[in-house]
Image (cartoon, rainbow, N blue to C red):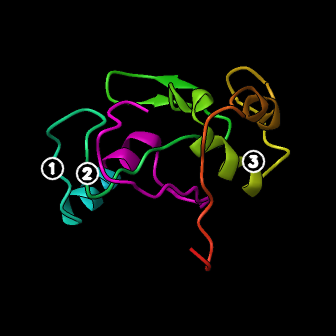
Amino acid sequence: MGITDQPWFLNQVAEFETSLFPLQLLHRIHRVENELGRVRTLVNGPRTVDIDIILYGNTVMRSAQLEIPHPRYRERRFVLAPLAELNPALRDPATGEPIMALLDAVRAQTVRRLNENN
């Protein structure tokens, strides 16, 4: 996706609970990214780390700083495949569409699973 002339990178999906509201969580994420050496120079360009909020429970929101669900996650197999593995019964809170249906729509995209043999 985006700029393809860059080193390979890893993607993962994690689920967790937080007492932070979405914008508070975004600010915390930016702080963590900065501490890990992220420098924002080129959109979709090489970076040390990129942490996105894909979903936040059933929240649907759009502000100048943050859109939930993530505006492009439905187009990205590298997000949908691990998300479906984590919770195959999940539905998109904005459309009600099952994650498995969203994943089926992007099956043609290439994603390579990393395991202990790689």
Give the crowd class for mark 3: few <14, some 14-19, many >=20 residues within 10 Å: many
N-terminal label among 3 and 1: 1
Seen at 39% across and 54% down, the residue is: 8
Q: In this view, does 57 lie above or below 16?
A: above
Look at the numbered discs 1 and 2 and tell me whether their residues touch, using CB distance below 8 Å.
yes
Residue displayed at 37% across by 30% down: 2
| Horizontal side of residue 61 vs 84, given as left or right | left
Q: How far apart are marks 3 and 2 (CA)?
A: 26 Å
Q: In which quarter of the image is residue 95?
A: top right
Residue 57 occupies which quadrant of the picture?
top right
Q: Where is residue 74 in the image (x, y as percent from the top left)?
A: 62, 28
Q: Is residue 76 left or right of residue 102?
A: left
C-alpha separation, residue under disc 1 versus residue under disc 2: 7 Å
Q: CA separation, marks 3 and 1?
A: 30 Å
Label 2 Cα crowd, 10 Å radius (few <14 / some 14-19 / many 20+): some
Q: What stretch is highlighted in magenta?
A: 1-27
The tag earlier along the polypeptide, 1 or 2, is 1
Q: Which amino acid does label 1 sit on?
A: Val
Q: Is residue 60 above or below residue 39?
A: above
Question: Counting other residues with Cα less than 10 Å from the Cα at mark 1, is it few (<14), some (14-19), or many (20 or more)?
Answer: few
Percent x, y of residue 65: 32, 29
**Residue 3's spot in the image, x, y percent?**
32, 33
Does the segment drawn in magenta span residue 17? yes
Amino acid at pointer 2? Arg
The residue that label 1 is drawn on is 39
**Residue 54, x across and y down, in percent:** 54, 40
Position of 97 relative to 44 (above/below): above
Indicate whether 116 appears above or below 100: below
Residue 84 got which mark?
Answer: 3
Dot 3 or dot 2: first in sequence order is 2
